[in-house]
Amino acid sequence: MTTTQHKAVAAGLALLLTGAASAVGAGSATAAGSTVQLPVLSSRLDAGAACATGSDRRATDVPWEQVSLQLSRTWPFASGTGVTVGVVDTGVSSSAPALKGRVTAVGDAGTDCVGHGTFVAGLVGAAVEDGVRFAGVAQQARILAVRGSDARGAVTADRVADGIRAAVNGGAKVVTVSAALAADSAALRSAVALAAKKDVLVIAAAVPDTPATATSTDTPPARDYYPAADDGVLSVLDVDVSGKRPTGAYTTSSASIAAPGDGVVGIGPKKAGHYIGSGASLAAGFVAGAAALVRSVHPDLTAARTATLLRASAYPADVPRLDPYAAVTSVLNGTAAAPSRGDAGTPVHLPADKAAGPLRRALWPASAGLAVIIAVVWLGLILPRGRRLGWRPSRPEGTAGPEPEGAESPVPVGTGVQGTSES
């Protein structure tokens, strides 16, 4: 090998090592820089505990739940305009920046000491803010704040029933209920019946939120919870990033649909920061936002048919998983909701590792360096050696001119033996 060839190979190796080092550094920095520790959301406060003050930490990455629900594909088709969603919870803060100007409160529900109702309302319809990629499902929907608990989050059947009635009478077309009660009541059934009569879709958490102390050995037995198990209610289970139920979660055998609810990002009652929370009550918020999108696109669709469409367009699973894009873009056939999923039928692959995308992008310099070194080695070593051994490039088929004397007919590497066809 000549001195020039040695220098060329050395330069190629240096470039390859530099690219590889850049890839490792970029992947690590991006992965580390994208990790934001968010405060954990509470669903109720103990006696004497201070009210939620809001979070100073902001989530700057796209949350996994927005990716899994394909919201970026859905928003060009629907925004929730013209639809009011009732949030029966701990109240919804009318001063939450991401909901500014779109919250109407029943009574004192415009304040939220706990923060849970505001979090759910944000999943339904929080608007995009500068520097933040988190957003609610239906960003133009209006929110009707209704108390379904006391000021500190304690619930009873009567409070929840009164909340559903207030939301229906307040003009909501979709109502999400966070409470999951162990016993049914006449008041709950009456409130749900009123909603059906007024063509209002009631969506409720199928189970209570996962206990904070849950482990793999204390999963509660399956049972029904209310109002989710009442006739006419769309009941919602929570799933994690892999589409599975969280460890230690409450279970039921009668859920209608599933949605993200484990480690999801949301807003607080004050400030512009974010919290992280888990539970079926949060999954119900996502479904309520999707219902608002559907009812904004198909204003003539009844509440019952909206529920049917959400389930029929969902991704097939033990409990069908919510797919807002498929629901919004479905073609309705006649008077029945008969969705045609089209390309929305392709399974949604949930991201298992938030750093995978940045890492793949970081590996591009290494790939480029590898291509360069291969080219350098080819030009500096293999090509001259081949010429010394009498190598000649193959000619395209049909090229005129005799073969060099003593040379074998070249066959491209990887070319199979061609059979002859009979005339």
Image: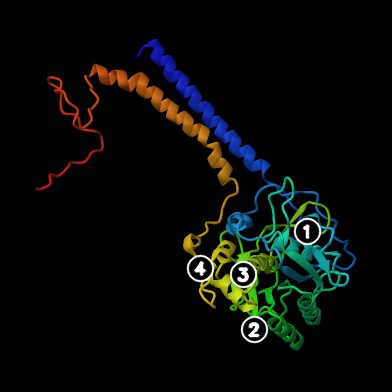
User: Which mark sits nearer the N-terminus, 2 or 4?
Assistant: 2
Q: Is residue 248 left or right of residue 91?
A: left
Q: Foreground mark, 1 or 3?
A: 3
Residue count near mark 1 (Cα–Cα under 10 Å), binned few <14, some 14–19, many ≥20? many
Q: CA distance from mark 1 to mark 2?
A: 32 Å
Q: Is residue 325 left or right of residue 250?
A: left
User: Circle 3 sits on which residue?
Assistant: 298
Q: Is residue 314 above or below residue 157?
A: above
Residue 86: image location, x then y, percent: 75, 71
| Residue type highlighted by circle 3 | His
User: Circle 4 sits on which residue?
Assistant: 316
Residue 146: image location, x then y, percent: 81, 72
Residue drawn 88% across and 63% down?
A: 49
| Residue type highlighted by circle 2 | Asp
Q: Foreground mark, 2 or 3?
A: 3
- Of the numbered discs in the image, which one, if any, rests on residue 231? 2
Q: CA distance from mark 1 to mark 3?
A: 24 Å
Q: CA distance from mark 2 to mark 4?
A: 23 Å
Quarter of the image where one finds residue 228: bottom right
User: Circle 1 sits on which residue?
Assistant: 99
